[in-house]
Structure formats: C-alpha cells, structure tokens
Amino acid sequence: MESTQEGLDPSPFFIMGKVALVTGAAKGIGKAIALKLAEKGHDIAINYFSSETDALYLQETIASAYNVHCLALQADVSREEEVDAMISQIESQLSYVDILVNNAGIDMPNLFQFKTAKDFRRILDVNVVGAFNCAKRVYRHMIDNKYGKIINISSTNGINTYYPMCCDYDASKAAMISLTHNLAIQCSPFVNVNAIAPGFIGTENELDGYDEEFLRQETDKILLKRYGKPEEVANLVAFLVSDEASFINNAIIRIDGGQYGSC
Ligand code: NAP
C-alpha cells in the first residue's frame, strides 16, 4: 500500500512524502527530527510519553508551517500494547509507517552504589525494548512494501564513552547498536536500518542542571570545542532517510564533533 492520505483532504500542493514516526518527539532531538522530516515533506507522527502540551504545540507548528499531515500520539514505547494501539491509529489516520526513528530514551544518572535493578530495567525497557516494540510492529509492512527506513538513536555512550553515573544507560545504548545489526539482518533486503550515536548534544534536558565548569570540561573533550545542536542530528536523520543514502545500511554513525579522551 502506498502512503496515500485518503480522506484527509490534501491540498492541491500536497507533497507526496512518506509517513514518519518519531518516538519521544515532543522535545529535544526528537522534536528537531520531526520538524526536519516535515520540512522534507513527510507526514509526521509525534509520539510522546508525558509532554502532552509540547507535543500538541509541535503538532500545530508542523501542521501550519509545512504542507504535511501531523498527529501527536501518547504511548509508553516500553509497552507493546500501547505501541500497537498507537501504530494502528497512525495506519488508520495517515498510512503505514515508512520511516521509524526510535528516539525515545531515558537516563537516570546516579552514583553506582545507589543504582537499583528496578531503574536499570526501566532504562532497558524504554531505550531497548521500546525500540524493539516499534520496529517489530512496523517491519512486516516495510518488507511487504519493499521500502522502509529504521533509525535507532543510540549514543557514543554505547560505544566507548562511559560515565560511571550512567552504567545502565550506557548498556542500553550498546544494546541498541546490537539491535540495529539484528534488525538490519531481519529486514533485509529492502529496509535500511542504521543507528546514530550522538555525543554531547545541547538539548534543554541535557543542559539543565549542569554547571559552567562541567560544561567546559565536557566541551573540552570535543575537537570542535562545542556541544552539538539537535538540528545537526536531525540533518543526519534527514540524509539517512533520503534516496542519497540508499546504500547506507547496518551502519553506526557517530555525530560527536570529534570526541576524544573517552575511557
Ligand atoms: P529528551 O529531551 O529527554 O527527550 C527524550 C524523549 O523521550 C522525551 O521527550 C520523552 O517524552 C521520551 N520518552 C521517555 N520515556 C518514554 C516512553 N516510555 N515512551 C515514549 N517516549 C518516552 O532527550 P534528548 O536529549 O532529546 O535525547 C533524545 C535521544 O537521543 C535519547 O534516546 C537519548 O538517549 C539520545 N541521546 C541524546 C544525547 C544528548 O546529548 N542529548 C546524546 C546521545 C544520545 P516525554 O517528554 O513526552 O515524556
């Protein structure tokens, strides 16, 4: 089935794009990705967990600024039945999901001695099982349609930038890389599955609570001597889902300004 917009009263200037689901898209990197993919002419499903006001505001912004359809949908990606209901709603109101960006993620930094198995499991559930749930729900259609793009937002923390306060988060981001390789095999040969590993990206959430000295130390580890912008990650996502990137598959792509000094 093509990404038609039946019953949605498209304007005569409607750009026939794909349907893109971005998880955790109300804020931060996910929001920048949703805006960039809308700019490229794709219909957008904004998934959010708790940020309803931000998600609805973004929905309005996209619908008024770009000639695409946009839906905001609440779901906890770690819960299979909520993911199923969310994607059924996208399918009935837009069409099948052609582009999936698994961006939703949580971190609960804490000293190792205060970490709990419960928190560890929650981080794995949202960051890894959430990505699995979404991919599992859409991959069959992508294969049948002989088209699909899946992008997992991992982190340099999943490769070689470890923080003692984030052992659970780091493990989850490493698991997303492994999941990417497995999904690429599972979805072969028509679906491109890639992971992006951002370094330090200056989202509101990331900057909140850090003092000047910490920010200076962190940016000092980056060759470009600054942190990245959410829009720079969004540009990479837009490239990866474009036809120009059609032979990029099963890749883990760092976007970190040239980070060094990691343990
Ligand atoms: P953020 O602003 O905290 O955004 C993460 C989003 O994930 C939130 O908006 C949240 O939605 C959503 N989320 C949390 N739990 C969820 C759940 N159970 N179901 C659905 N959505 C859920 O963080 P960010 O900095 O933009 O990060 C985005 C992604 O990039 C994350 O995967 C993060 O690990 C990764 N990353 C970030 C950096 C960085 O430096 N910022 C670096 C490397 C990787 P609600 O707000 O609606 O609750």
Image (cartoon, rainbow, N blue to C red):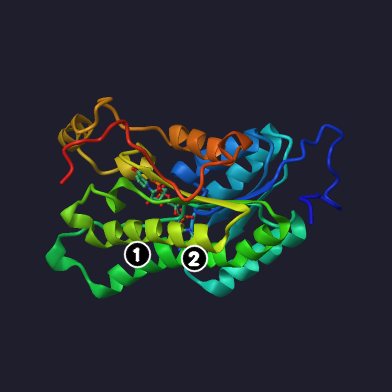
Q: Is mark 2 within 8 Å of ligand 1?
A: no
Q: Is residue 108 left or right of residue 192?
A: left
- Residue at image point 21% right, 35% down: 215
Out of 2 and 126, give the one closest to the viewer: 2
- The image shows residue 121, relative to residue 92, as above or below, that is below
Q: Is mark 1 within 8 Å of ligand 1?
A: no
- The percent coordinates of residue 80 (x first, y second) are 54, 73
Q: Is residue 87 left or right of residue 80?
A: right
Determine contact: label 2, label 1, CB under 8 Å. no
The label shown at residue 123 is 1
Label 2 is placed on what type of residue?
Phe
Q: Secondary structure at mark 1?
A: helix
- Residue at image point 52% right, 48% down: 26
- The percent coordinates of residue 248 (x first, y second) are 51, 42
Out of 167 and 135, give the one closest to the viewer: 135
The label shown at residue 132 is 2
